[in-house]
Amino acid sequence: MEKIGFDFENVGGLAECYAIPVNLFKRIRVDYLRGLRNLELTDRSSVIAIPMYADDSFSHKEEKKHADGGDYWEVDIEGVVPKWCKGVEGLLETLERGEWLVLSRDNNRTVRLSGSVDVPLWFESERDTGMGYSDRNGTTFHFTGNQPKPSMTLDMDDLSEL
């Protein structure tokens, strides 16, 4: 019999998020001997790091669905870019116009690659100043897409060293 184990050292949310243009993807390097998978890119210059803001601002959700053509997973990676201002508009526009792979690390240190060259993720956003002085001013974003399989778990310790 097989049994699912529980890890009680479990916290929610994402710690890091990187948007990778599809054209930079080189391969997933697999070390079959040790069972490790690592992402390789052709270049890092166009990767966009999206820093986490506050403890509640980033999440990664995947929902398995079934259709006539087979199973698929709806991916939704959500976050907040604080302060709607001139300094972030250029990168937000780049994100809105591109096709993306998203590399994320959750607060349990699990690294996932979402999207693929064939089925990229799309960036959607909503900008809001809030209504009151104490409201959050910023851009809420979602990387969304339907994938033929769940996001791939990778073995990477330092995402900034892509």
Image (cartoon, helix red, strand yellow):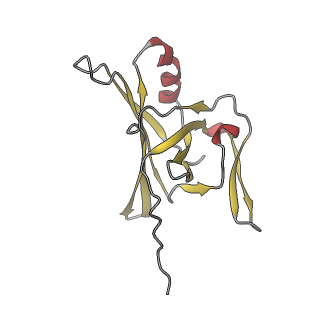
| Residue occupying image coordinates x 60% and y 37% | 20
Q: Nearer the viewer, residue 14 or 70?
A: 14
| Residue occupying image coordinates x 43% and y 52% | 11
Which quadrant does the C terminus fall into? top right
Which residue extends farthest top?
Answer: 86
Q: Nearer the viewer, residue 144 or 153?
A: 153
Considering only vertical position in the picture, is 78 above or below 68? above
Considering only vertical position in the picture, is 105 above or below 21? below
Considering only vertical position in the picture, is 137 above or below 151? above
Percent position (x, y) of residue 47?
A: 63, 32
Percent position (x, y) of residue 106?
A: 50, 48
Percent position (x, y) of residue 35?
A: 70, 66
Percent position (x, y) of residue 75?
A: 43, 49
Q: Could you tell me how many numbered marks the image carries?
A: 0
Considering only vertical position in the picture, is 52 above or below 91? below
> Is residue 76 in view from this perspective?
no
> Is residue 44 in view from this perspective?
yes
Give the side of residue 155 with respect to residue 6, left or right.
right
Q: Nearer the viewer, residue 47 or 130?
A: 130
| Residue occupying image coordinates x 52% and y 32% | 50
Which residue extends farthest bottom?
Answer: 1
Q: Quadrant of residue 129?
A: top left
Which residue extends farthest front?
Answer: 9
